[in-house]
Image (tube, helix red, strand yellow):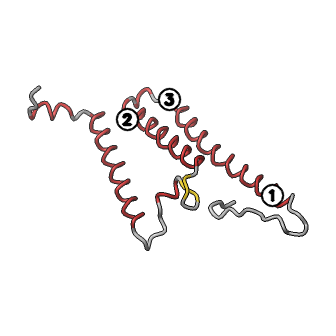
Amino acid sequence: MTITFNSIVEWFTVAHTMQLLLAILVLGTFYILVQLSRNPDDTLNLSDLVTVNGRLDEKKFTRFGAWVVSTWAFVYLIVNSPSNFPEWYFVGYMGVWVSNAIFDKYMTAKEMNAETRYRRYDNTTPIPRYPDREL
């Protein structure tokens, strides 16, 4: 297969251009986040997306992986077939991720309340603290 100038120009259809721009945007954003994460004076740390206290957290890791895959699929559907993209895809996508965050907050609060409720009166039972959680 011979690559000519005309074949390169013909490749730049709307869909291919959108895919190229999306790839450049994702790679550029990832590069900037890595550079910010390497800065010791900055509070941004990419490892916080999948770790708790420096150790890999299975729940955070799987949630982040599922978010990356579903977001990429969502954007892929929009780029490749915008005319066949029903609105309920967006409603479903947002519903899944918002309900996931709300459910996690609810379960964390319930777990913390149960630990404080059943604490011994002599304060000999240590209560675990959750420094990475905010309610």
Q: Is residue 56 left or right of residue 129?
A: left
Distance (Cα) linking label 3 and label 1: 45 Å
Q: Position of residue 75 (x, y in %)?
A: 42, 38
Q: Is residue 58 left or right of residue 22?
A: right
What residue is shown with label 1?
Answer: 115
Image disc number at residue 86: 3
Q: Secondary structure at mark 3?
A: loop
Foreground tag (3 vs 1): 1
Structural crowding at the residue carrying mark 1, measured as other residues with C-alpha within 10 Å and reported as few (<14), some (14–19) or many (≥20): some
Q: Secondary structure at mark 1?
A: helix
What residue is shown with label 2?
Answer: 79
Q: Position of residue 12 (x, y in %)?
A: 22, 35
Mark 3 or 1, nearer chain start: 3
Q: Amino acid at mark 1?
A: Glu
Residue 7 quadrant: top left
Distance (Cα) linking label 1 and label 2: 48 Å
Q: Residue at 43%, 26% (x, y): give it.
A: 84
Q: Is residue 115 left or right of residue 39?
A: right
Q: Position of residue 126 (x, y in %)?
A: 78, 65
Say which of 126 and 88 sits in front: 126
Q: Residue at 11%, 25% (x, y): give it.
A: 1
Q: Secondary structure at mark 2?
A: helix
Contact between labelled residues 2 and 1, with CB atoms less than 8 Å apart: no
Q: How many marks?
A: 3
Q: Residue at 41%, 28% (x, y): give it.
A: 83
Distance (Cα) linking label 2 and label 3: 13 Å
